[in-house]
Image (tube, helix red, strand yellow):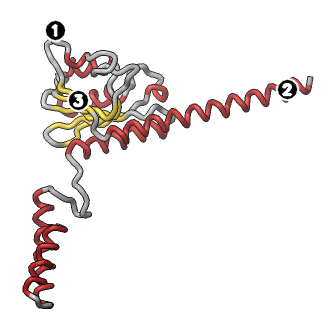
Amino acid sequence: MAQFGRALRSGRRGRGFESRRFDCVEESLKTLCVQAFFVLGIIDRTGGEQVTEQEKFMKEAIRQAKKAEALDEVPIGCVIVYEGKIIARGYNRRNTDKNTLSHAELNAIRKASRKLGDWRLEGCTMYVTLEPCQMCSGALVQSRIDEVVIGCMNAKAGCAGSVMNLLQVEGFNHQVKITQGVLEEECSTMLSDFFKRLREKKKQEKAARKLEQERLEAKE
């Protein structure tokens, strides 16, 4: 757009005249170009770069992760997409439900299966903020899901390429396509900020317990 505007102005100067009519034509052409770029998906209505489809669905997964964070759970969220639409959402509820199985991925898989009326999630894609663990990776293979799109990797427990890659074991009868790094910084920052706050909270609680113990000992 900037180059287009400069070209018009250059042509105007070359002809050596100032014309309100020309200005109107220039603005009209600019408007038409913006509308055309919007239709083609080059820019969005705000004038910024358009969010990709993968980023759009990952943002929804991040919103699910924030629901977990509101419960003081590790902020992990995911969505499952079928034919371009979200059919299931899930977020980490392990402590809330007091259930080892209540990971974001498994919660979403259960909902997607109910929605489709089938345990097979063929044709589906999962968008998840953190690389799945061994349990969730195994469930994803069992579900026959097509693809998993991952926000950030999990060096200590991830089983989609970090510690191991259970999603693409050649000996299994199904392998899952993996896409990494969609909104990686946002997903990673969300987790690191959570654990930073958790460490600070534990530090404060420890200091409070120490002060209380000292107070009790002083009374004796």
Instruction: Classify mark 1: helix, strand or loop.
Output: loop
Q: Earlier in the sequence, mark 1 or mark 3?
A: 3
Q: Does the residue at mark 1 contact the one at mark 3 (Cβ under 8 Å)?
A: no
Q: Badge 2 is on which residue?
A: 216
**Residue at image point 35% right, 30% down:** 130
Q: Nearer the viewer, residue 101 or 69?
A: 69
Of residues 208 and 185, the one nearer the viewer is: 185
Q: Residue at x 79, y 29 (%)?
A: 212
Q: Residue at x 34, y 32 (%)?
A: 152
Q: 10 Å neighbourhood of mark 3: few (<14), some, or many (≥20)?
A: many
Question: Which residue is under mark 1?
Answer: 171
On screen, residue 173 versus residue 150, left or right, reads left
Q: Residue at x 22, y 54 (%)?
A: 50
Q: Which mark is residue 148?
A: 3
The picture places residue 2, in percent across and down from the top left corner, at 19, 68
Q: Nearer the viewer, mark 1 or mark 2?
A: 1
